[in-house]
Structure formats: structure tokens, C-alpha cells
Image (cartoon, coloured by chain):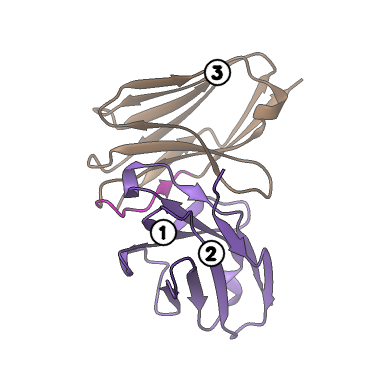
Amino acid sequence: GENVEQHPSTLSVQEGDSAVIKCTYSDSASNYFPWYKQELGKRPQLIIDIRSNVGEKKDQRIAVTLNKTAKHFSLHITETQPEDSAVYFCAASGSGGGADGLTFGKGTHLIIQP
Amino acid sequence: EPEVTQTPSHQVTQMGQEVILRCVPISNHLYFYWYRQILGQKVEFLVSFYNNEISEKSEIFDDQFSVERPDGSNFTLKIRSTKLEDSAMYFCASTEQGAFTEAFFGQGTRLTVV
């Protein structure tokens, strides 16, 4: 089955700086890669996603890049703000067909230092 | 905005007891999922459900687990004989068109087995 590795486990950045979180996946048939933000005690919420036919996607301060050859995708957050502090999870799905569940990485605890 | 709702928000049960966790997916969604998250760990896929049957299940989803869509709106997860290690947050999720579209998560049910 699919395996998703995520790094780093903790990332501390100064407010206003950029943050980058990286993930790799094992199954080359995976074709959907979402990123979820989870605040303490809350549900995971989608912040951005990318499909395998696209190399990059941007939404305001958030961007995701995908390298299918390397089986690697990354989340970039620019101009970080205190409200960006949370745990971020990458995930992959699609290799098992239409009802395939998401395989999540272990999460990155992003800390924005004021 | 439509959302996935789960009840109860917190369930405490004695080891060996049966529990049923309930979910109401978004009304026009066709694919339903259960995930669990042990405290401080990643979100793990349990099972997906489409067209009134299980589509995929993980190794975690053993004979102690079952799912059901008893009517047109509810989606339930039953654990027949709970174990201490079943203590976790259980999230229901739904998607409109399967693995390649956004999964909307419910707020979760925190299950504590004592």
C-alpha cells in the first residue's frame, strides 16, 4: 500500500518568514495530494490540493509543488502569521481507485514565533 | 456551508462494550469514510463506503468493526467489543466524487475506552 513520509516533524519560523514542508510518497499510481491543517482538538481542514496532471498550484500565501518523477510534493507558506500555527498533514490517494482513502503523513507542527 | 456532523462528540465506554459512532455526511456526497487519530499521531484510514457497500478497508478495520448506512442520511461505525487501544478520535468524512476530490471531515468523536 501507499506510504507517505513527511518532514520536518516540527518547524519553527519567525512571523513573516516562509515555511516549507516536504512529503514523499511510494505509490506512483497515486494522483491526488491534499494538504490539511489541524488545530488542536479540531477536525482536519483542507487548505490546498494538487492533482498529478499539475506541477504547481497557488492560493494567496499558500502554494504546493509536485514532482511526479521524484514522488515528492511540498507545501510553501509565505509571509507566515500567528494564525498559521497548527499541525499540517500531507496525504495521497487515488492509487486504489475511486473510493481510495487518504494515506496521511505523520504531520508537521508549525510554530510561528512572534 | 454544508458540513459533516458526528455524534456523540465524546464517548466513554468500558472495555468489551459495543459502541456505535454516528455520522451524517454532506447530502449530495456519494463516498463516505471513517478515519481514526490516536492522540498526537497521524490520521489513519479505516474504511471507505460507496453504493451501499464497503469499497476499501485498512488492516486496522478487522472483524470488530462494521459500518452501515441504515437510512438515507446516517453512516455509522460499530465497534463490537472495544479494547483499550481503540481509544482515539474517530473522524467521519465524505467526498462528492471519490478519491480525487476534497474530503470534508466531521468534527470527530473522541472515544475513551476504560
Nearer to us in this view, A32 or B96 = B96
Instruction: Give the answer, above or below, for where B3 lies relative to B53.
Output: above
Horizontal relation, residue A98 to residue B65: left or right? left
Question: 10 Å neighbourhood of mark 3: few (<14), some, or many (≥20)?
Answer: few
Determine the chain carrying the residue at label 1. Answer: B
Q: Is residue B20 left or right of residue B75?
A: right
Closer to the camera, B31 or A29? B31
**Discs 2 and 3 lie in a common subunit:** no
Chain B's colour?
purple
Amino acid carrying label 1: it is Phe
Colour chain A is painted in: brown
User: Which range is magenta?
Assistant: A97-105
> How many labels sit on residues?
3
Q: Which residue is mark 2?
A: B23
Find residue B63 and name its label: none
Residue wearing tag 1: B32
Q: Residue at x 65, y 41 (%)?
A: A39
State the CA–CA distance, disc 1 to disc 3.
Answer: 31 Å
**Relative to A43, is B6 above or below?**
below
Q: Which residue is mark 3?
A: A61
Q: Main secondary structure of the magenta part?
A: loop
Instruction: Give the residue displayed 67% in from the left and 82% down from the top.
Output: B14
Residue drawn at point x = 57 percent, y = 52 percent: B41
Q: Dot 2 falls on which chain?
A: B
Quadrant showing the C terminus of chain A: top right
At label 2, the amino acid type is: Cys
Question: In the image, residue A18 lies at what x, y percent?
Answer: 58, 16
Q: Quadrant of residue B107?
A: bottom right
